[in-house]
Amino acid sequence: QVQLVESGGGLVQPGGSLRLSCAASGTDVRFSGMGWYRQAPGKERELVAVSTSGGSTNYADSVKGRFTISRGNAKNTVYLQMNSLKPEDTAVYLCNAEFIGILTTNYWGQGTQVTVSS
């Protein structure tokens, strides 16, 4: 059974940095894409950043220039370096992995809380 485990969340002051990590287990396939979403209280889940197996990346406008997504050397790992954090970045950050085969399957982690506050 595929599992995604996130780590690296926490409490940080505005302007600070955090690095989120996500590792998948339970499969040997390489995901077509891995990325990060976030969900703040009372708001819909939104895309933060995604990285495809081909090397392309895509970011939400609100995080461009501040966040960087990268795939790890180990298969099926993904990181999110978050700099210049703002209070509006506060949310639960969820790792997502997509496998495109005969069917497209999405997997989700449990999420890690990021709180930006002074």
Image: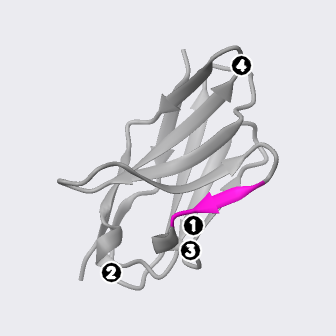
For marks 2 and 4 on the same chain, the one whose residue lies earlier in the sequence: 2
Disc 2 and disc 3: Cα gap in Å? Answer: 19 Å
Q: Which residues are magenta?
A: 56-60
Q: Determine whether the residue tagged by mark 4 lies in a helix, strand or loop.
A: loop
SS label for mark 1? strand
Which residue is located at x 24 percent, y 54 percent? 43
User: How far is disc 2 from disc 1 in space, using C-alphas?
Assistant: 15 Å
Say which label, 2 or 1, has the lower sequence index: 2
Which amino acid lies under the numbered mark 3 shown in the image of this protein? Answer: Lys
> Horizontal placement of 19 versus 71: left or right?
left
Per the image, the residue denoted by label 1 is: 81
Q: Which residue is mark 3?
A: 64
Of label 1 and label 4, which has the lower sequence position? Answer: 1
Q: Main secondary structure of the magenta part?
A: strand
* Image-quadrant location for residue 86: bottom left
Residue 57 included in the magenta stretch of the image:
yes
Q: Which residue is mark 2?
A: 13
User: What separation in Å lies between label 1 and label 4 (alpha carbons)?
Assistant: 29 Å
Specify the quadrant that holds the C terminus. Answer: bottom left
Query: Which numbered marker is on residue 101?
Result: 4
